[in-house]
């Protein structure tokens, strides 16, 4: 558990709004350790691979999108989940490949859950105050639908340990992940706190 890893990507809007340091600081303050990090401009093909790692992503995303329209009392553009998610994916490809992103791997106990909690819900409008998306973004699904684009929500964070492993393997090579001791590991993980006094 103490070496659980998760994948995070600070999206192009996070870079353009100069929020990289602020976002990373929130993860570090929680006790998570950065074990890999790089800045890249992902290709459209790479973004498509990222979202197709889960073979159910298209169906689940399409169903969620259609349900969102219905919940708002609106008619969805299509009743076909695959067609609906194809629109979402095309918007994500355009958004995620428009400029640089920062990809990183964070390590620590419950890293997947901690990061998801810190990031907040996918839609900034409904994300809680105190979360990254709730504090720094004013976008909504409604506005992104009107504009015909992906919602701008600063950060991608893996949704499960399995998803994190798949995303890490896609974005990083083994030699890019660094194993090292961090001074705070003692205070976070030493059960007896024997190493404090000299």
Image (cartoon, helix red, strand yellow):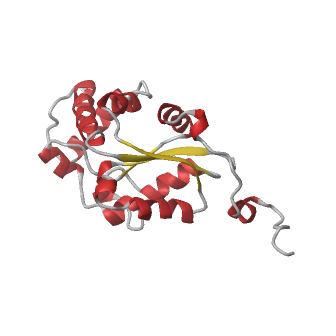
Q: Is residue 184 above or below residue 59?
A: below
* Residue 20 locus on image (x, y percent): 40, 59
Horizontal side of residue 192 vs 94, given as left or right? right
At 14% from the left edge and 38% from the top edge, which residue is drawn?
75
Quadrant for the C terminus in the image: bottom right
Q: Work out whether residue 132 or residue 174 is closer to the camera in this orientation and state it.
A: 174
* In the depicted structure, whether residue 109 falls above or below residue 22: above
Residue beneath the point at 21% across and 41% down: 70
The residue at 32%/64% (across/down) is 136
Q: Residue at x 21, y 32 (%)?
A: 87
48 left or right, relative to 26: left
Relative to 182, residue 178 above or below = above
Q: Could you tell me residue 104's position as x and y percent?
A: 49, 47
Residue 82 lies left or right of residue 174; in this view the side is left
Q: Position of residue 30 (x, y in %)?
A: 57, 63
Is 183 on the left or on the right of 144, as rendered?
right
């Amino acid at each position: 558990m103490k070496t659980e890893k998760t994948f995070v990507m600070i999206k192009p809007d996070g870079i353009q709004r100069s929020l990289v340091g602020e976002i990373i600081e929130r993860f570090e303050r929680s006790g998570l350790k950065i074990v890999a990090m790089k800045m890249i401009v992902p290709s459209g093909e790479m973004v498509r691979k990222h979202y197709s790692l889960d073979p159910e992503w298209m169906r689940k995303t399409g169903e969620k999108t259609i349900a969102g329209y219905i919940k708002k009392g609106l008619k969805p553009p299509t009743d076909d989940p695959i067609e609906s998610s194809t629109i979402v994916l095309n918007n994500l490809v355009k958004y995620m490949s428009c400029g640089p992103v920062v990809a990183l791997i964070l390590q620590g106990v419950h890293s997947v859950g901690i990061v998801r909690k810190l990031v907040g819900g996918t839609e900034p409008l409904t994300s809680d105050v105190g979360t990254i998306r709730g504090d720094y973004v004013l976008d909504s699904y409604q506005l992104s639908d009107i504009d015909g684009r992906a919602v701008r929500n600063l950060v991608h964070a893996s949704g499960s340990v399995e998803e994190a492993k798949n995303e890490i393997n896609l974005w990083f090579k083994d030699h890019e992940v660094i194993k090292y001791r961090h001074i705070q590991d003692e205070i976070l993980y030493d059960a007896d706190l024997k190493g404090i006094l000299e």
